[in-house]
Each structure stands twice: as C-alpha cells, then as structure tokens.
Image (tube, helix red, strand yellow):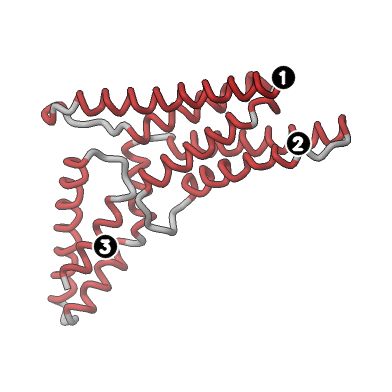
Amino acid sequence: MTHKLENYVKRIVEQTDCSKSEREDLYEEMLSHVMMRREEERQKGKTEKEAEEEAMKLFGREAKIGDGLQQAMFPYRRELLLLLALLGFLFTFGKYTAVLVQEQTALLPILSGTAGHSAVLFFALNRAFAVNRKIWLALALLLNLLLLLLNMTSFYGGWQPAYLLMIGLNIYLMYRTVLTYERPKEHKTARRIIHVVNITLGLAAGLGEGYIYLIAMGF
C-alpha cells in the first residue's frame, strides 16, 4: 500500500519548479510526514487501506498542496501569470472590437491569441488537477508567446507599449519557469548556460521569422 502514498506525494512534488535534488528532498520529507499520519490512523484501529485514505484526506488534494508550495517558493508568480493572461484577453478583445468598429471587418485571426491566454490562465488558477506543472506551464507560455508574435501586426500605434509589456512578461516567466535554481553544491552552471542559450536562440529565431514574415506581407 505504500506505493499509493508514494504516488500521492510524487504528484504533489510535481507541482513545484524545484531542481531535481530539491524535489527529492521535498519528496522524502513529505512522504515521511504522510506515513507518520498513516501510522497514527492505524493505531486508532483502522485498516492499512483506511489509514492511507485518511492520511491523504487530511493532507488534502495534491494540486492544492503543490500550488501552495510553489507559491511559497516563488511568491507572486500566480499574480504575474494572471496579469499576463488578463492583459492578453483585454488587448486581444479590445483590438478585435476596435478593428470591427473602425474598419467594419471581423479579423478573426486576432482572436487566435485567446488560446494562449486561456492556457496561461488555466495554470495560474489550477488547484484541482495534478499535472507536471513545470512542463505544461512552460508549453503554455511558449504557445502564448508564439501567438503574440504571430499577431504582432495587430498591435501597432498606441497598442505597442502594452504589447511589449506582455512579450517581456511572457519571456521572463518562461525563463523563470524553465530555469530552476540549482543548489551551488550541484555545480550545474554549465547546464543552466546551455538552457539559457537554447531558449534565447529559439526566441531569436522566432523573432527573425516574424520579421521576414512582415517583409513578405509588405511585398
């Protein structure tokens, strides 16, 4: 039955952006607490299965606990994600409405950006589904960034400051999510540098393709 508790704690730890060693430490610590709770319930006369169920019930939902741990490790990240998503929705629908009223044209491609904003918003608010938050949040941020870049021609003139703010915030959260802080004793600076270079080159390539796309549209 211990296997069930191990999976339970593993799902909690997966909600955090910790490094591998930090996750292992957190896993061991939380597993010991859950098992202690199970033993307390067994001493009250419950069967092993009942004791495990009660121990997990007392600890709470995996996603909710993991979200609380992540908030303690990275304060205000949820608020920043919410800000990014809300800004995206505000300016996407605002721009769509402005074009619809001024030019009497329904530019539906502008609304494609809501897919990225929705993904970011989901992971900002998710406290119900236990998922590997680091991977899925990074993918959501990447999708949001790509859709923002694809719709860059829609944000011109007075929209540019807000557009640049969204791009900058998106890139910051992406770096911060992917590049977890390793402990000094791990000596993994080289790996972090490789990740930084790969992400930066990917973003640069995306911007370059967007620039070529704009030139092609001009012709």
Q: Earlier in the sequence, mark 3 or mark 1?
A: 3
Q: How many marks?
A: 3
Task: Identify the mark at residue 38; answer none if there is no mark.
Answer: none
Q: Secondary structure at mark 1?
A: loop
Q: Residue at x 30, y 50 (%)?
A: 14
Q: Is residue 38 above or below residue 145?
A: below
Residue tagged by mark 2? 96
Of the residues under marks 2 and 1, which one precedes in the sequence? 2
Cα distance between the residues tagged 3 and 1: 57 Å
Give neighbour class at mark 3: few <14, some 14-19, many 20+ (Cα, 10 Å): some
Query: Where residue 172 sits: x, y (%)?
Result: 44, 27
**Which badge, 3 or 2, comes first in the chain's sequence?**
3
The answer for how far apart the CA atoms under marks 3 and 2 are is 44 Å
For badge 2, the amino acid type reads Tyr
At 60% from the left and 38% from the top, the residue drawn is 86
Identify the element where label 2 is drawn: helix
Instruction: Say if 20 sits above or below 6 in the image.
Output: above
